[in-house]
Image (cartoon, grey):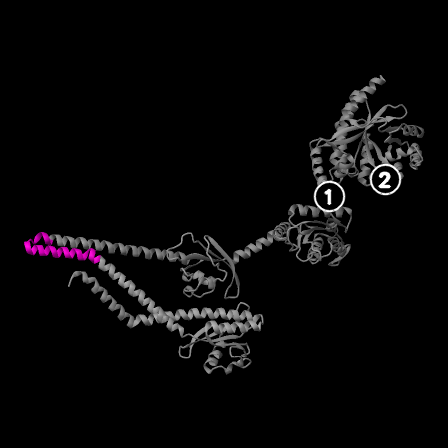
Amino acid sequence: MRLNWLPVLLVGCLLAVLFAADKLFLRALLDEQWQQLKQAQLSTRMVDHTEALGVALSQRDDLMVRHWLKRLSRDEQVEDVWVISPTGEIEYAIDVHSEGQHFSVLPPQIGKELESWLRLPEHRLFPYAGEQKQLWFGDLTQTPMGMDGGALVISTYDLAAFSLTEQAYQNMQLVGFVFVSGTMLLISLFFHLTVTRRIALSIERLKRFARERVVVPVAKDFWRDLELLSQQMYAVFTQLLEQEASLKERNRLIQNTYDNIADGVFITDGHLQISYANQRAAEIFGYPAALELLGVNIETLIPEFPSRLLHNTQLDWSFQHPDGQKRQLRLRWDLSRHSVDQSNQFFVSDRSAEVKAELQLRRLVFHDNHSGLLNQAGLEEAWHSLSRVSAQGELWIMAAVGIDDLKDINLAFGLEISDSLTHYVASNLPKQTPRGGLCARLARDRFAFAYPLQQAQDDPEALCRRLVQHSHMRSMAVGNKAVRFSISCGYVRLLHTHGFGSALQRGLTALDVAQEQGKGEVCHLSDAQFQRFSDDNRCLLRLHNAISKRLLQLYIQPKLALANGQIVGGEALVRWQDEGKWVSPADFIPMAERADIIHYIDQYMIEAVCQLVARIRQRFGAMVLAVNVSAKYFGREEFRQYIRHTATKYQLQPGELEIEITEYSLLEISSGVRQSMSLLERLGIGLAIDDFGTGASNLSSLISLPINHVKIDKSFTEQLVGSGRGRYVVESIFAFSEPLGIRITAEGVETQAQREALDRLGCDYAQGFLFYRPMPAQKFVELMSEARQQEA
């Protein structure tokens, strides 16, 4: 026999061993494993069918149930199906003649198994009729729709499993033969290239030795070759053992890592079937052991799983756990390092606690703790979210609601009562808001709501009116107290694509206007009105800047004695040049009063006039200058401290300064007003009533208060000439002023006829365009200098 046939002999021996092993135990082992796998796959399909039936039954859709029975009979080739109600009645079956009867009509073995199963219902699959059939019991209470009870019984043929097992075995046998044959061919090639060739050489040397009778050199070479070959084989086997040990250690470390991480891990093959899973993954999906996940398709386990995997992607979904709780899970995978065998590694984590914490944090951030409504941040986020999905050009209403005089209610009844009131308004506001709208609490006494304007809905004006009327002067019982309150409302119409900040600003501006009009008012703010208010606010900011940087200017309108025409004093007027344009005092003075900064202008004017008085005193002697003080500031302690400090600082002499107030300051003479008047009298500062006759004149105040000067308004001066009734009013003023020793100044004298009329009435002083227009303080000083030179 030639040495080249030695590998062939080895191949024959191994094939004989393989056939013997197959006959003894391999075929039975493979059949058992394959049968278990088929039962697991059949159980999975039966669970899916049970859940599908549960959905159909929960919807009471008879047509859907019949369709499901037909599809089950066709696709799964089942023999019989019975749906048993909790009372034991057969509700549905493939054989409709058995419907409505008790399950005792079923075959005896099935009825016996069903009575045993009802004591402990659960999904179960077991062989029936001598292993030729499979009997499935499904518990309808475990379906996602949560049925009240009942069972699903399915009898199915499973004969195909054995034919599939036979085919699978034959395929495996063929693969084994191919593998062994290939291995033997490689061994043959190895022997041919190494051992056989070397043995052939040795034999050739022996033959040559026989011919030449040379023994020693040939033997040495032969044993040297054998030693070298054995060393090479030893090195190869040693390296293989080391690689095997390294691979086992690596697998052990990976297994240990997977078992100790907090996330679930599972690996799938190229068909997305799970080939490995750790215990944490089994716990997350509700399996008792990780081994039960093996062979499960990931698309069956996760219905939301994408059909096409992307690199560096994750999936978040809600999972119904077998314990009945819904859990928020996240699946992550990375395909950037794709393996040769197309296996994929997945990580799954339970984010239920994290999502719950995020929802709680989101509620704290975007909701008001007291009322439960959205806060301003929440309203802004909801506004932006709706902007992304709203139709182009859709109109929205942004409305602001405010509780009128809540601070007064708080002072009168206490913080607890006012909190109950705000809670009452907050709880009723969502009921009045149209469907699809947003409600929010912006501040303690302010709320807002927004909703899309639709043709079918009421006009927003009517809605706001109903809201206001519902609570107008309403009495709310809190304990044994009755609290009356009212609310006001302001709203605007705008596109939903409008910026949230601008929309809310417009709504709050409309509310401010409504509350300025009174209690329980409604105001719709148009774009033009809002633009005007915005301009006023910007103007107010510039006025703040002008006051702080002392950019206001002091003007003086000279006052003349009508008897000789000499300048005896002047009235201080404030002027403001904003961005190169003069702003009328009639515009910015009311603005300053509304913003409660008028006292800063009063202080600036008092300081500037006192400086001018001291300057004039040094050059020309004593002269009286008058300055206006607002009604709000006149009665404050702050005014009294300031006027006392300024008078001391500039060493004012009696009669050098005169304070002008309007008649409105005397409508309600408070103790503060009386203290201010008394202080002015002690300091030698005169007190005059400006624009006398235009307000609610209180003649008794002229008698009881230290007033020694009144100024007739320009509107009465204009009526001195002609047949107007104002002439008689002026004459009456002169009639009662002269006996009281009150001096009179006429304002707004513009014609010679008016001056002559005043001369006839015996008027003391006059000022107006007929004599001089208001001029800067420096020009007034120059005018006084010229007048003194002329007198000299």
148 or 346: nearer the eye? 346
Is residue 605 visible from the viewing direction of this image?
yes
The crowd level at tag 2 (other Cα within 10 Å; few <14, some 14-19, many 20+) is few
Earlier residue among tags 1 and 2:
1
Q: Amino acid at mark 1?
A: Ala
Marks 1 and 2: which is nearer the front?
Answer: 1
Magenta-colored span: 190-219
Image location (x, y in percent) of residue 355:
54, 56
Mark 1: secondary structure: helix
Residue 660, x across and y down, in percent: 82, 33
Q: In this rendered view, identify the residue nearer to me: 444 or 252.
A: 252
Mark 1 vs mark 2, CA separation in Å: 32 Å
The C terminus: image quadrant: top right
Sort mark 1 into few (<14), some (14-19) or many (20+) by Cα contacts within 10 Å.
few
Question: Pointers 1 and 2 in contact (CB under 8 A)?
Answer: no
- Label ID, residue 528: 1
Q: Residue 570, located in which quarter of the rendered image? A: top right
**Residue 167, position in %: x, y?**
35, 70
> Is 762 in front, or is 530?
530
Which amino acid lies under the numbered mark 2 shown in the image of this protein?
Gly
Which residue in the structure is indicated by mark 2?
695
Vertical relation: 727 (above or below) 358: above
Q: Secondary structure at mark 2?
A: loop
Q: Looking at the image, can residue 713 be seen?
A: no
Q: Identify the disc placed on residue 58.
A: none
Magenta stretch secondary structure, dominant: helix
Task: Determine the residue positioned at 49% across, 70% down.
Answer: 49
Q: Is residue 200 magenta?
A: yes
Left or right: 724 in relation to 48: right
- Which corner quadrant holds the N terminus? bottom left
Q: How many marks?
A: 2
Figure quadrant of residue 294: bottom left
